[in-house]
């Protein structure tokens, strides 16, 4: 796959988003009389500003019914930062199984069925585990964790996730000494997930979506399996019924609607790395010193704060601000090469 790049100062909107979405947004700008504002010269650090033109609107409610969860406590890992409004967390998502626009997942997932559900933990383990839907909420005590979430597209959120450390479920399976990596797989169901049946999306990505971590990353206490947000079960657009949250990595590592966890001896393939390894590394640690080939990663736009046209941005922190907890995992590694 050949990807042409420009100088960052020359990056256009088309460089940071898919062509069909770009065309839709250009059409919108023409309709509202903004086509002459010079999109081709927009700064590359504004990679996320065009999220508003993703083809939909924030919804105040959804057809999918979320249920309240019983929590044992709350921990603020965002150090008092203001939460992203819930309607933004529900309405602004990358979940290509339901479409490529930010609003598509909410609009296209409201009939998604989470029951019955099966999650299996297999591979280099002494005990294979199979869990049903109700079991997902009984693996460990459910706690709320407020994490910063940084998207590779240079926007971010602060989200109160509900769940437990991934290590809890891995320990129950008794991993063998050969378990060096943990692979994850999303549900494959084109009837429920129209993006998997789409010629545009399906022609670009190999389904089902897969992700992976090194075993020490997976066992880090910050690495979380989430079953909810805002004290309720996950909405389908956020990855119902169970998803991965790794707060020091870019958001695409947070695989959604997980049906398989597989412990392996060798590094597993991952969806975006397989498609464009130069742009999406296996590690995908948030690193403001290493730019995406088509835009800067030095700063980010916090969703839900200020005007959609505001140039106000915040500085991106190494490891998304969680370096004290995770930097030792990469001691001696060249993080400009192991992206």
Image: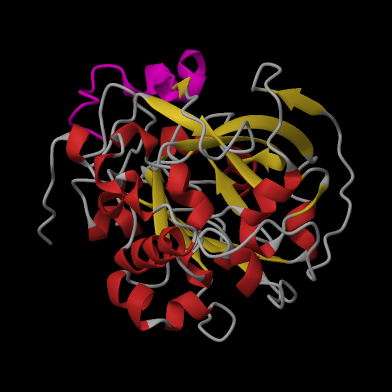
**Nearer the observer, 209 or 267:** 209
Q: Position of residue 27 (x, y in %)?
A: 40, 66
Q: In which quadrant is the C terminus drawn?
A: top left
Q: State the residue at coordinates (63%, 61%).
A: 237
Whether residue 30 appears in magenta in the rendering, the answer is no
Q: Quarter-wise, where is residue 103 in the image?
A: bottom right
Q: State the residue at coordinates (43%, 24%).
A: 319
Asked if residue 270 shows in the view, the reply is no
Q: Quarter-wise, where is residue 6 in the image?
A: top left
Relative placement, left or right, of 141 versus 217 is right
Whether residue 320 appears in magenta in the rendering, the answer is yes
Residue sitting farthest toward the top? 324
Q: Which residues are magenta?
A: 316-339
Q: What kind of colouring is applied to the model shown?
A: secondary structure
Asked if residue 307 shows in the view, the reply is yes
Residue sitting farthest toward the bottom? 191
2 in relation to 187, above or below: above
**Nearer the observer, 232 or 242:** 232
Q: Position of residue 152 (x, y in %)?
A: 39, 41
Q: Position of residue 20 (x, y in %)?
A: 35, 69
Q: Quarter-wise, where is residue 328 in the image?
A: top left
Q: Position of residue 279 (x, y in %)?
A: 24, 46
323 in relation to 105, above or below: above
């Amino acid at each position: 796959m050949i990807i042409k790049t420009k100088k960052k100062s020359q990056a256009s909107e088309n460089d940071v988003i898919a062509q069909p979405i770009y065309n839709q947004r250009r059409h919108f700008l023409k309709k509202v009389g903004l086509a002459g504002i010079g999109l081709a010269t927009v700064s590359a650090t504004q990679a996320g500003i065009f999220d508003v033109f993703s083809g939909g609107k924030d919804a105040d409610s959804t057809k999918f019914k979320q249920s309240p969860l019983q929590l044992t406590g709350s921990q603020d890992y965002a150090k008092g930062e203001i939460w992203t409004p819930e309607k933004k967390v529900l309405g602004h998502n990358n979940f290509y199984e339901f479409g490529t626009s930010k609003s598509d997942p909410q609009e296209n997932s409201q009939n998604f069925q989470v029951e019955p559900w099966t999650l299996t933990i297999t591979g280099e383990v002494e005990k294979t585990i199979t869990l049903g839907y109700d079991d997902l909420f009984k693996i460990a005590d459910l706690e709320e964790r407020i994490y910063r979430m940084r998207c590779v597209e240079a926007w971010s959120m602060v989200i109160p996730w509900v769940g437990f450390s991934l290590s809890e479920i891995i320990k129950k399976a008794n991993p063998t000494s050969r378990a060096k990596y943990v692979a994850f797989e999303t549900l494959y169901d084109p009837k429920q997930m129209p993006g998997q049946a789409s010629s545009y999306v399906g022609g670009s990505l190999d389904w089902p979506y897969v992700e992976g971590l090194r075993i020490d990353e997976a066992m880090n206490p910050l690495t979380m399996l989430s079953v909810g947000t805002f004290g309720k079960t996950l909405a389908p657009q956020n990855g119902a019924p169970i998803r991965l949250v790794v707060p020091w990595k870019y958001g695409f590592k947070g695989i959604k609607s997980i049906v398989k966890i597989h412990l392996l001896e060798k590094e597993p393939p991952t969806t975006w790395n397989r498609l464009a390894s130069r742009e999406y590394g296996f590690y995908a640690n948030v690193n403001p010193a290493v730019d995406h080939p088509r835009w800067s990663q030095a700063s980010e736009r916090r969703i839900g704060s200020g005007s959609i046209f505001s140039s106000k941005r915040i500085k991106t922190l190494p490891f998304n601000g969680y370096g004290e907890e995770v930097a030792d995992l990469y001691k001696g590694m060249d993080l400009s090469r192991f992206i």
